[in-house]
Amino acid sequence: MKAVYLTGHGGNEVVAIGERPVPVRRAGEVLVRLHAATLNRVDLYMRDSGAGITHTLPQVMGIDGAGVVEAVDEGQPGLQVGDRVLLYPGVTCGHCEFCVRGQEVLCTSMKLLGEHRDGTMAEYIAVPARNAVPMPEDWTFEEAAALGVNHLTAWRMLMTQARLQPWETVLIFGIGGGVSLAGLQLAKAMGARVIVTSRDADKCARALALGADAAICSASQDVVREVMRLTGKRGVDVVFENVGAAVWDSALKSAVRGGRIVTCGATTGDQPGADLRRVFIRQLQIHGSTLGNLAELHDLVRFCAQHRLRPVMDQVFAMDEAHAALDRLASGQQFGKIALRLA
Ligand SMILES: [Zn+2]
């Protein structure tokens, strides 16, 4: 089968586009003919370093994907050949302390597609049957693929960790990236008020067009001062953050007393000052979050279908154009998800 796979680490030279063996489906697994995958920042990390992530080369890239069930055990509940599915990206053990209480995202031996094992930028993948989730009826495969990582991450951040309420205000840093845009869409659909930030005035304008209530252009405006102006000097209830060190101080200063800050990333650095006095005096709650549980993915799919909410897509590339797709991701110019068409 044709696949995009890593032969080493460091730049596009190590990203090969060529033949890999079709995975062999075992009992309890589903073989999926993939139609689309979308790109995530971790793909660049795997390409350039992969340090700290146990994996074996060559390895197929890609953490999210969607396609059609090609083979599955007879009588597998809720799944049959021909079903259009999207993939939950984590393969979990099913029996550790966390898995048994439905917190498989905390599984001590979770293996992520495209990180610890072959991923989704290929014509076929075999995963445990529970990892295949029926996708919304009228969605494209590119849109469905985008749901499994970014939207799931944003869903868990807002719903499970921050417990965002419809009457609350959320501040989303760095609008334009997949998780931030997913956060904007989900928070608006939940009925909350959303303020976004970006250094890029054009991205601010596009976020407003997508329904953001206010946008702060951090290249020309002071984020904390603007947040206080927009909230009557109160601050926001929830800060949604994956930028890291560059904005952490503003994140702490933008939250209302007792507010919640949820972080799922640290693109600009992971060791900011902590300002513990502010954290305890103002009783701020800081939540770490990554991905989500399988049950959360099922809830998310239903929520998106009900609210007619679709992921924002940036650009779709053919599998042969994987290098250009990775370059676009690295450029940071995208607004929404970059997808690879695999069929
Ligand atoms: Zn487990």
Image (spheres, rainbow, N blue to C red):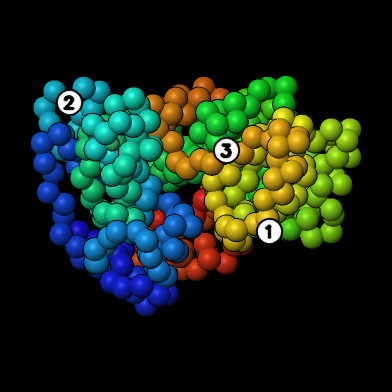
Q: Nearer the viewer, residue 317 or 239?
A: 239
At 28% from the left edge and 39% from the top edge, which residue is drawn? Answer: 92
Residue depth check, mark 3 versus mark 2: number of the one nearer the observer: 3
Q: Is residue 151 left or right of residue 89?
A: right
Within 10 Å of the Cα at label 1, are there few (<14), some (14-19), or many (20+) other Cα atoms? Answer: some
Percent position of residue 45, x then y: 44, 63
Dot label at residue 76? 2
- Of residues 20 and 226, the one nearer the viewer is 226
Instruction: Say whether disc 2 or disc 1 marks the residue closer to the N-terminus.
Output: 2
State the SS at label 3: strand
Question: Where is the N terminus found, in terms of image quarters?
Answer: bottom left
Provide residue 62's location: percent of width, then percent of height: 36, 55
Residue 255, percent across and down?
Answer: 75, 38
Q: Quadrant for residue 138, please give it.
A: top left
Q: Nearer the viewer, mark 2 or mark 1?
A: 1
Q: Is residue 188 left or right of 337 when viewed as pictured?
A: right
Ligand 1, image quadrant it occupies:
top left
Instruction: Give above or below for 240 relative to 274.
Output: above
Mark 1, secondary structure of its residue? helix
Residue 251 spot, x, y in % from top left = 71, 46
Residue density around tag 3, few if under 14, some if 14–19, many if 20 or more, within 10 Å: some
Residue under label 1: 246
Question: Which residue type carries mark 1?
Answer: Ala
**Vertical order, 31 against 330 (above or below):** above
Dot 2 crowding, Cα within 10 Å, few <14, some 14–19, many 20+: few
Q: Residue at x 35, y 26 (%)?
A: 102
- Identify the mark at residue 287; answer none if there is no mark: 3
Give the amino acid type for the residue marked by disc 2 in the picture.
Gln
